[in-house]
Structures are given as structure tokens and as C-alpha cells.
Amino acid sequence: MFKNIFGSVMDPERNGLSDVPKVVRFQLMLALSFMWSIIFCISAGIFVWLPGYMLAHVVLLLLGIFGTSWIFKTSQSTPGSQ
């Protein structure tokens, strides 16, 4: 089950970016990796620095999930993506 979930996000042949050219797919996956790295660094810093700010951690996590979903859906609906 977890392997399927992981593959649906991380496998470039199965995720929402599978319809775009490989170069664009690589660029978008790179941008997403930077975005998630920043989100987790900020979240870890907030958690260690001020444990009372767990709401900020949840908001950042949700923004990352919605941002990733938006990029996947936008890439699928872009005309001429193949």
C-alpha cells in the first residue's frame, strides 16, 4: 500500500507530471523538492524553537500538499504538454 502511494508521487512515470516532457518534469520535480525542503526546515525550526507553534507546522504542510496537487493538476490540463 505505501509503495503504491509513494510511487504515485515520486515515480515520474506514474505521478501527475507524467504527461509533460522529461525536461519540464525534471524542472518541476526539482522545484517541488526545494519547496518541500524549505517547508520541512521551517517546520523543524519552529518545532524545536517554539513548540507552541504546531499550527504553523500544519499550515505549512497543508500548503505544500495543495501546492503539489495544484502543480500536478495544472500540468495535466496544459495543452500541448506531450
Image (cartoon, rainbow, N blue to C red):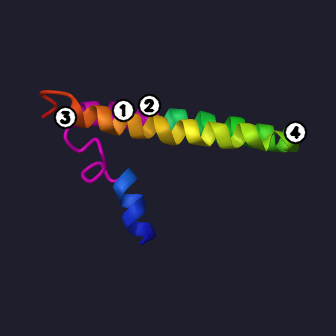
Q: Are marks 2 and 4 in contact (CB under 8 Å)?
A: no
- Would you place residue 33 above or below residue 7 in this image? above
Q: Residue at label 2?
A: 31
**For the residues carrying marks 4 and 1, which lies nearer the camera in this image?**
4
Count of numbered circles in the view: 4
Left or right of 28? Residue 78 is left
Q: Are marks 1 and 2 in contact (CB under 8 Å)?
A: yes
Residue 58 in picture, x, y percent from top left: 67, 43
Q: CA distance from mark 2 to mark 3?
A: 15 Å
Quadrant of the frame with the C terminus: top left
Q: CA distance from mark 3 to mark 4?
A: 43 Å
Q: Is residue 22 magenta?
A: yes
Q: CA distance from mark 4 to mark 1?
A: 32 Å
Q: CA distance from mark 3 to mark 1?
A: 11 Å
Q: Residue at label 4?
A: 50
Q: Residue at label 3?
A: 21
- In the drawing, what numbered circle is on residue 46? none
Q: Residue at label 1?
A: 28
